[in-house]
Structures are given as C-alpha cells and as structure tokens.
Amino acid sequence: MEEILKGIRAFVFDVDGVLTDGGILADLNGELYRTFDSKDGFGLRMATMHGYALGIITGGRSESIRARFRTCGILPEDVYLGVRDKIEDFQDFCQRHKVKAEEVMYFGDDLPDIPVLKACGCGVCPCDAVPEVLEAADFISSRPGGKGCAREAIEMVMKLQGEWQLDVQDYKKKF
C-alpha cells in the first residue's frame, strides 16, 4: 500500500456522504443545502497548493457545489455535476490532467462509486459507507463522511510523500 500511496498525484471525490455527512436540507423553493467540514476543506487546499490535481464527481446538480470547491482551489471544469456514470468522468479527468488511473486516490461511499473505487490507484471510503463500498475500498477512513474522512487520507498521502507543510505566504497568496 505504501508504494501505491507514494505514487498518488491526484485526488477525486464524491460529495454527498464523503465531503458531507449525506444530509441535505431543502427549502420551500427547492434549494438544497449541504454542510461541509472545514478540516476537509483545508486538506483540499493543502493538496492544491502542493500541485496535486483535484476533482469532484457527484450526482448532485447544484451550482453551490462548484462554488464551494472553487474556494478550495478546484477548477470549475474539474467539478462534474449531475453524474450518473462516474467512470466516464473519472476517465475524462485523468486524460485532461495526464494522470494514470493508478495515480489517483478516489473517495466514494455508495454504489455508484464502486466502478471508480476499483479503477483508481487507491479507493477510499468513510467508515459509514454502504457495505458494498466498504468491501470494494482499499482504505477505510476512521472518520465518517463529512467529518474529516478526506482530510485523513489526504494528510496520510502528503505526509508519506513529504509534502504536508504549510507555507503561510503561499496560502495567503492563493486563498
């Protein structure tokens, strides 16, 4: 596993159940609201600052998702919304960033994520993922979705690669 983690160059995430706890609030106008963990967000920023490619592949359709991850340094074109076949967009992400599937860590929690979890270099899921995903994942976070799952795995990879350092001036410049 350590050799695989040393080769990770990109992180790709599902949203609901991974970067959120899966809960969605809806108002009377049909607007949907999600809660994100700030520690996960900081982990995404650290990965961005150190040159990792980051992407979002979600069935969610709200433009608020794209806006949220823009604040983490993820480019709008790397946020795939309304996805029903995640492997197609995963392949597009890899091609556009010139990374091999085995150089990507993918985070998922439910059945639509399984093909990507199996295709990537290291499939990660939160500890509260559905049983089939727990079985398919290479790494099961000690954290549930929306509660630091992404941060835990990003930090693990970056520490192993000697990249987990904060340059405050770079952080101020980029964020």
Image: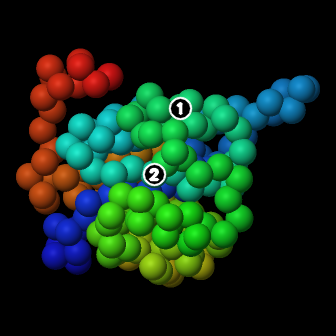
Q: From the top left corner, tell me how far across and down residue 139 is, in percent.
A: 37, 70
Q: Which residue is mark 2?
A: 55
The answer to whether residue 123 is left or right of residue 112 is left
The quadrant in which residue 99 appears is: bottom left
Q: Secondary structure at mark 1?
A: helix
Measuring 48% from the left and 55% from the top, which residue is drawn there?
13
Q: Indicate the quadrant where residue 66 lies.
A: top right
Lower sequence index among marks 1 and 2: 2
Nearer to the camera, 95 or 125: 95
Identify which residue, 80 or 14, lies in the foreground: 80
Measure the C-alpha gap from mark 1 to mark 2. Answer: 13 Å
The percent coordinates of residue 158 (x first, y second) are 19, 52
For the N terminus, give its image quadrant: bottom left
Q: Tell me the SS state at disc 2.
A: strand
Residue ID for mark 1? 68
Residue at coordinates 51% horizontally, 39% vertically from top-left? 76
Q: Give the residue drawn at x 69%, y 48%.
A: 60
Outermost residue to the left = 162
Mark 1 belongs to which amino acid? Answer: Arg
Tell me which residue sits at (41%, 66%) in the image: 95
- Judge from the rendering whether residue 137 lies leftward or rightward of residue 46; answer left or right: right
Residue 143 seen in the figure: no
Looking at the rendered image, the disc whose residue lies closer to the viewer, 1 or 2, is 2
Residue 154 in the image, given as x and y percentages of width and height? 30, 52
- Residue 163 versus residue 132: which sits nearer the camera? 163
- Residue kind at label 2, given as amino acid type: Gly
| 153 left or right, relative to 146 | left
Residue 23 coordinates in the image, percent (x, y): 68, 43
